Image (cartoon, rainbow, N blue to C red):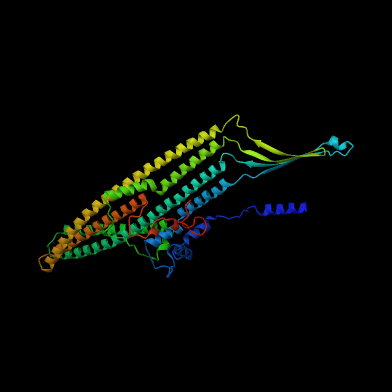
Amino acid sequence: MNRYYISIGLLFFVTSCAKFDYQPLVSTTSLDSIENRSLSSFELKEYIEGILGEIENWPKNNWDLQYLILAAYYFHPDLDVARAKYSIADARIITAGMRPNPTFSVSPKYDFNMGSASGNTSPWLIDASISIPIETANKRGYRIAQAKNLSESAYHDIMSVAWSVRGRVKSALTNLYSSQEKMILLQEQMNKRKELIKLKEKRLSIGEISLSDLVLERIALNQTNLLFQDAKLLYEDALIALASSLGLTANALRDIQIDFQIEEEGLSKFNDTILKTLRYQALTNRADLLSSLAVYKASQSALQLEIAKQYPDINIGPGYNFEFGDAAWGIVFSAIMPIFNQNEGPIAEARARREAAAAQFLALQTKVLGEIDSAIVNYQNSLQKQAVAISLLHEEQDKMLRAEAMFHAGEEDLINFTNIQLEYSATRLGFFESNMQLQQALNTLESSIQVSLNFSEDEVLCPLDFAIPKNNSGIKKGDRP
């Protein structure tokens, strides 16, 4: 019967142990995985449906900002790294909460002198004991508190990375739209300049203008053509940047249509009071600051743990002694005697780490303050530039309308009218560029304060709790350490 129970115990011990599962990582396989990522992926569809609900038509023909940001939440490797770090931090809570296992020791001895002597006295001496460690001074509680604080820090790191990913998607999308529209406007200018060159060639043939006038016009056409080529390069760069911000290759975006939904007029404008409120909110609630605060709280718990270690843990348990045929039972009690040190070194280190964590938070808050103030100034300057661009556009628009009326009335020369059209086109381009600069300034401000500045925007565009999990493991919807 005893053998039966021993066998059952050994079997339970063996089967309850964790087993190693080999998971190779091969660079060529991972590269294939990256290059085969697609916006038509059904795994992506399931992920988006878990947030927005059922999607009727898949693959999607049109991808707007909302769906692109959710695709970035799913594909981008920076978020995978942040999620993995959170899983590590979460597992450390389990480690911190583990209670120490008891120790069993046995020391059999054989007395050869007694064994050679006659008699019934056993020559065996056996000392056996079970030592059960008991942690004192709430050490386990402090360990758990430290691990939970570090887990909270890792959670806020996910949110911080998500805001960064979101900002990169919006910035790349704005650049892509800007370069695309700029090509259209520059193409219009080139067409007008070609018309103008034909008109001037006719005038040159009858001696009404000099060759230098025609040469200057051809130079202007060439310069516009170069600007057009630059815009094409910017478009390709923006496409690659958008793909990178999604965690995809540029080829994955070649066959899709993008619904930009970028306003060229009526962009959000904020007064100083609103900006001051947003600034204060960011300086107290930005994800990276909350992460740093959680690290500081973890350093507090670490200091409490080191102070608690001044008080020794206790080991207690039953003991058995068998000596020359006599058996005895007893209680074994042991503890470290804090005579030579009272854990002064680790306590000093923990205090220093707490001071370092406080200094790091202050340094980060100062850095964030600079980022936000810079973003606000950039936004205000862009707003002023847009106001000037609007004023110039209205002036050129009025000028062109007057010239058009005069041209149709036969009071304006075709060459002069075409020049006025070119001036208006150039002013439109400047106005468009000022709008895009303002849009990028808003994107930068939004990323720096980590608050959506488009109040009509769907909340899923913001890195909320339910937009973070990638699958059913790890962080769950609404979970917060």
Residue 176 in view, yes or no: yes
Q: Residue placed at 24% from the left, 51% from the top? A: 384
Q: Is residue 81 above or below residue 319?
A: below
Q: x, y (%) of residue 432?
A: 26, 58
Q: Is residue 410 above or below residue 14?
A: below
The image quarter in which residue 293 lies: top left
Q: Residue placed at 47% from the left, 43% from the top? A: 295
Q: Residue placed at 52% from the left, 52% from the top? A: 87
Residue 468 horizontal side relative to residue 280, left or right: right
Residue 440 horizontal side relative to residue 425, left or right: right
Residue 204 in view, yes or no: no
Residue 290 horizontal side relative to residue 233, left or right: right
The image quarter in which residue 204 lies: bottom left
Of 411 and 374, the residue lying toward us: 374
Q: x, y (%) of residue 262?
A: 31, 60
Residue 333 horizontal side relative to residue 204, left or right: right
Q: Is residue 457 above or below residue 378?
A: below
Q: x, y (%) of residue 420?
A: 17, 61
Of 212 and 94, the residue lying toward us: 94
